[in-house]
Image (cartoon, rainbow, N blue to C red):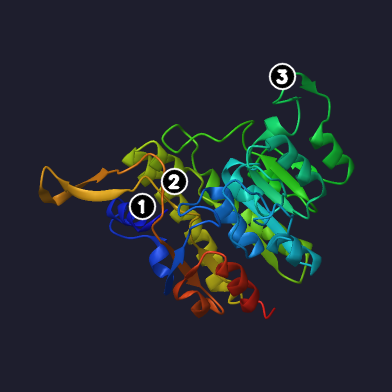
């Protein structure tokens, strides 16, 4: 989600986004430890452990040493923790906050890390990595059922947001067996609808505070596909979720909201359609990621820490400083 993705969103949403309610804007330098262009695993791990690492790393530093993530650190301090994504919960960005694996492609191992992770609630896809698992190496069945293991340890699994609202304790909601559908293919309001019930659950579990990671995962996928409509619909959907978070933060008065991206995807541009400057259309320079800086938006207490230009791993330290740590 680079600046162009944001621009395309407001151009197709009555010229406004909830992101515009966030008064502080900075720029994040996204390169990884080993390459000028990052992937999502290295980008998200920079946020979660405070160090730049190699492309593909999940919760590990550049020497493949597992490092405590900010989610784990805050959970140890009594915070409740949540993860929401429009992809599999084992995918690179959400995984980087609770798992520790040398490769983002080790989905079964990442799922296994969830068993002992201090995650209070999660919403996303990826049930296939938790039960009825097929070993990726030789195709043979894996008899380990992580859902049963987690349920035996007190985890609840629900099938609707209504059930989520009625739940207490640690809760998982697999919105789909694999990746959720796109907005264009009928996902609906799953992402914005998840914000309030997850916040309510996190608040009832502790008086210390909560830490929540929310990813509009498929903005990136629209860039990979070089499909402008895919980007725009996912961008607007994500912005609705941002609006829900900002509404809560405005009422609460003690919540920091930070919105940024692992990287930009697609080299996305907006050009005049047929040289008509009153009408724009999307253009792309690549089907992969780019190395351009991405915006960081912030709202709430200590949000001024996020102005300026800085490395992506500095966001970790800025979040801790905002908490007085």
Left/right placement of residue 269 relative to residue 74 reads left
Mark 1 lies on a secondary structure that is: helix
In the rendering, which numbered label is found on residue 139?
A: 3
Above or below for 79 versus 197: below
Q: Which residue is mark 2?
A: 219
The crowding category of the residue bearing disc 3, from other C-alpha atoms within 10 Å (few below 14, some 14 to 19, many at least 20), is few
- Mark 1 or mark 2: whose residue is earlier in sequence: 1
The crowding category of the residue bearing disc 2, from other C-alpha atoms within 10 Å (few below 14, some 14 to 19, many at least 20), is many
Residue 26 horizontal/vertical position (percent) = 43, 71
- Mark 1 or mark 3: whose residue is earlier in sequence: 1
Instruction: Tell me whether circle 1 and circle 2 mark residues in contact (CB < 8 Å).
Output: yes
Q: Which residue is mark 1?
A: 5
Above or below for 148 versus 296: above
The crowding category of the residue bearing disc 1, from other C-alpha atoms within 10 Å (few below 14, some 14 to 19, many at least 20), is many
Q: Where is residue 254, by image quadrant?
A: bottom right
As rendered, which of 128 and 269 lies closer to the eye? 269
Which residue sits at x=45%, y=76%?
Answer: 307
Residue 146 horizontal/vertical position (percent) = 80, 36
Which residue sits at x=24%, y=50%?
Answer: 270
Q: Residue furthest left?
A: 275
Mark 2 lies on a secondary structure that is: helix
Instruction: Tell me whether circle 3 and circle 2 mark residues in contact (CB < 8 Å).
Output: no
Left/right placement of residue 303 relative to residue 197 reads left
Image quarter hosting the C terminus? bottom right
Which residue sits at x=38%, y=67%?
Answer: 20
């Amino acid at each position: 989600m680079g600046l162009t993705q944001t621009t395309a969103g407001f151009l197709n949403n009555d010229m406004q986004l909830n992101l515009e309610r966030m008064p502080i804007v900075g720029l994040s330098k996204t390169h990884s430890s080993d390459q000028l262009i990052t992937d999502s695993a290295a980008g998200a791990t920079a946020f979660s452990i405070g160090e730049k690492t190699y492309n593909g790393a999940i919760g590990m530093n550049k020497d493949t040493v597992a490092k405590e993530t900010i989610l784990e650190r805050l959970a140890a301090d009594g915070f409740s923790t949540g993860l929401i994504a429009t992809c599999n919960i084992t995918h690179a960005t959400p995984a980087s906050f609770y798992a520790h694996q040398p490769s983002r492609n080790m989905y079964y191992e990442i799922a296994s890390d969830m068993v002992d992770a201090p995650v209070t609630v999660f919403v996303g896809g990826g049930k296939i990595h938790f039960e009825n698992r097929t070993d990726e190496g030789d195709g043979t069945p894996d008899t380990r059922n992580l859902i049963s293991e987690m349920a035996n340890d007190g985890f609840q699994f629900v099938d609707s947001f209504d059930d989520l609202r009625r739940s207490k304790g640690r809760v998982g909601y697999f919105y789909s067996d694999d990746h959720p559908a796109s907005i264009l293919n009928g996902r609906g309001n799953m992402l914005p609808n998840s914000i309030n019930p997850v916040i309510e659950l996190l608040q009832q579990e502790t008086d210390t505070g909560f830490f929540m990671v929310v990813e509009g995962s498929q903005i990136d996928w629209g860039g990979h596909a070089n499909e402008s409509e895919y980007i725009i619909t996912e961008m607007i959907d994500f912005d609705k979720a941002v609006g829900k978070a900002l509404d809560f933060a405005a009422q609460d008065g003690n919540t920091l909201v930070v919105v940024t991206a692992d990287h930009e995807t697609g080299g996305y541009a907006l050009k005049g359609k047929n040289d008509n400057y009153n009408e724009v259309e999307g253009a792309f320079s690549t089907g992969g990621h780019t190395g351009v800086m991405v915006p960081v938006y912030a709202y709430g207490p200590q949000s001024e820490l996020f102005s300026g230009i800085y490395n992506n791993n500095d966001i970790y330290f800025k979040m801790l400083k905002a908490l007085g740590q």
